[in-house]
Image (spheres, helix red, strand yellow):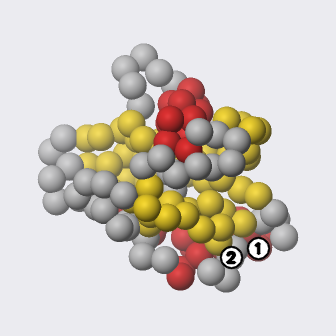
Amino acid sequence: MKTINVVAAIILKDNKIFATQRGYGEFKGGWEFPGGKVEVGESPENAIVREIKEELDTSIKVNEYFDTVEYDYPTFHLSMKCYICSVLTGKLELREHEDSKWLDKDSLESVDWLPADLGLVDKLKSYLKKNS
């Protein structure tokens, strides 16, 4: 099975997390943490900064590594490195997504997460609770 290596930004502000709804492709309509594929020769940290600039016209700072999700979709294996990030400049403009929301620990389960992203919800609730 083919492995796809991606990165995801868990953008944090005021103890809330930025979630986006996919606007394209096989998983259109599902909610996810924004990000994308790591290019050949690119570090995961550089990839997430580049992807958020492309997708949301926003510059971010990578604050810390959070987790790696390994998930088998029917046609590929996803390896997703996730990082806690903060906005440096920009307004998180949706260029590729249908919608977005800021979610706190009590509303993290209020959206229909894509399967790989759903695996992070409980750990993120604990993280937000600890940092509140």
| Residue found at x 51% / y 56% | 33
Q: Quadrant of the C terminus?
A: bottom right
| Element type where label 1 sits in the image | helix
Q: Is residue 50 visible?
A: yes
Q: How many marks?
A: 2
Which mark is in front, 2 or 1? Answer: 2
Answer whether labels 2 and 1 touch (C-beta < 8 Å): yes
> What residue is disc 2 on?
105
Q: Which residue reaches farthest top?
A: 41
Q: Please, is residue 12 above or below residue 37 in the view?
A: below
| Residue found at x 52% / y 52% | 94
Q: Please, is residue 81 above or below residue 74 in the view?
A: above
Q: Please, is residue 119 above or below residue 83 in the view?
A: below
Is residue 105 left or right of 21 when viewed as pictured? right
Residue 127 percent coordinates (x, y): 71, 65
Quadrant of the rendered image containing residue 40: top left
Residue 57 percent coordinates (x, y): 59, 39
> What residue is disc 1 on?
129
Residue 25 percent coordinates (x, y): 25, 54
- Binning the other alpha carbons within 10 Å of mark 2 as few (below 14), some (14 to 19) or many (20 upward) gives some
Q: Amino acid at mark 2?
A: Lys
